[in-house]
Image: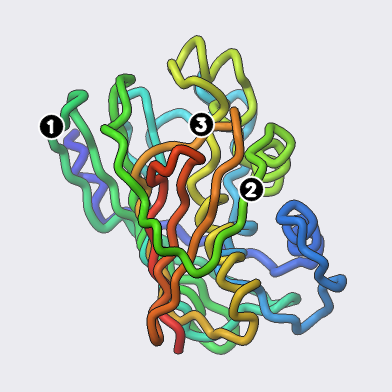
Amino acid sequence: MSLTDWIGKTETRTDTVTAGPVAALSATLDREDPDPQPGDPLPALWHWLYFLDRHRASDLGPDGHARRGGLLPPVPLPRRMWAGSRLEFHHPLRVGDQMTRETRVIDIKEKQGRSGPLVFVVVRHEISNSAGVAVAEEHDIVYREHGPAAPAQAAPIDAAWERTVAADDVLLFRYSALTFNAHRIHYDRRYATEVEGYPGLVVHGPLIATLLMDLLRRSLPQANVVKFNFRAVSPLFDMGPFVVCGKPDGKTVKLWAKDTAGNLAISAEALIG
């Protein structure tokens, strides 16, 4: 069976925007938000707290991910990473909402990279509440061999906003717990360094993206974000802090994350309506 046979596979899930995860992520991001109440809008990207994979322990592979197959193709490469996303926000999801998520595999491509074979899988999610589709997201997943990271790329130096984030193992543990993410590179130091060959624990890509959006929210609290996209460039690790940066340009806000050496980790852009 070819990997491309998975194109068009679909999945439907339902969930409820409960208040507990909202309060917990607010605390994790060191915000001073009031307790969430029914009807409060869910901040952009916080929908990642819902529709969580709840695989049984016996269904997990040695890296903590679910064993290959099911909705996603059984790609025979050891590393799986969230490479980026493109999102559109049509109207808010709110605390108390009943939600439905329709998911479809829309593309699978095999390529040859510097470190060996790569497989890119694109999954589209549409999340609806009683008012219709609220969030549409295309999520890029990349599978690759173990090997060296891409060469460092310098981050922009013209930020209007900056915030330094302590990338400690407590932050990574709390975000893994909130998203029920068992991928061991984020909390198991021995596995991350001895098996996967990383220098430390890996900071979650969606956590960095959430921190970028949180920087925008702190800097422009009344902004209504209608589109957001981000692309992972190089990983961040827990051996030291990293910096989230932003620069508004009319209705567009450029956002990026960098390590303390000035190397680019994630590049992003938000469109304000």
**Real-space Cα distance between discs 2 and 1?**
34 Å
Q: Residue 185 at what x, y percent from top left? A: 54, 27
**Circle 2 is placed at which residue position?**
165
Type of the residue with mark 2: Val
Q: Nearer the viewer, residue 90 or 159?
A: 159
Type of the residue with mark 1: Gln
**Real-space Cα distance between discs 3 and 1?**
24 Å
Q: Nearer the viewer, residue 236 or 178?
A: 236
Disc 2: CA contacts within 10 A as few (<14), some (14-19) or many (>=20): some
Instruction: Residue at 75%, 52% (x, y): give it.
Output: 28
Instruction: Residue at 33%, 20% (x, y): give it.
Output: 146
Type of the residue with mark 3: His
- In this rendering, the answer to whether 188 lies above or below 181 is above
Instruction: Name the secondary structure under disc 2.
Output: strand
**Circle 1 is placed at which residue position?**
112
**Circle 3 is placed at which residue position?**
65
**Real-space Cα distance between discs 2 and 3?**
26 Å
Q: Quadrant of the C terminus?
A: bottom left
Instruction: Name the secondary structure under disc 3.
Output: loop
Disc 1: CA contacts within 10 A as few (<14), some (14-19) or many (>=20): few
Give whichever of discs 2 and 1 has the lower sequence position: 1
Q: Residue 157 at what x, y percent from top left? A: 39, 57
> On the rendered structure, is 116 left or right of 125?
left
- In this rendering, the answer to whether 68 lies above or below 19 is above
Instruction: Name the secondary structure under disc 1.
Output: strand
> On the rendered structure, is 9 left or right of 99?
left
Residues at badges 3 and 1 in contact (C-beta under 8 Å)? no
Instruction: Residue at 38%, 68% (x, y): give it.
Output: 269
Residues at badges 2 and 3 in contact (C-beta under 8 Å)? no
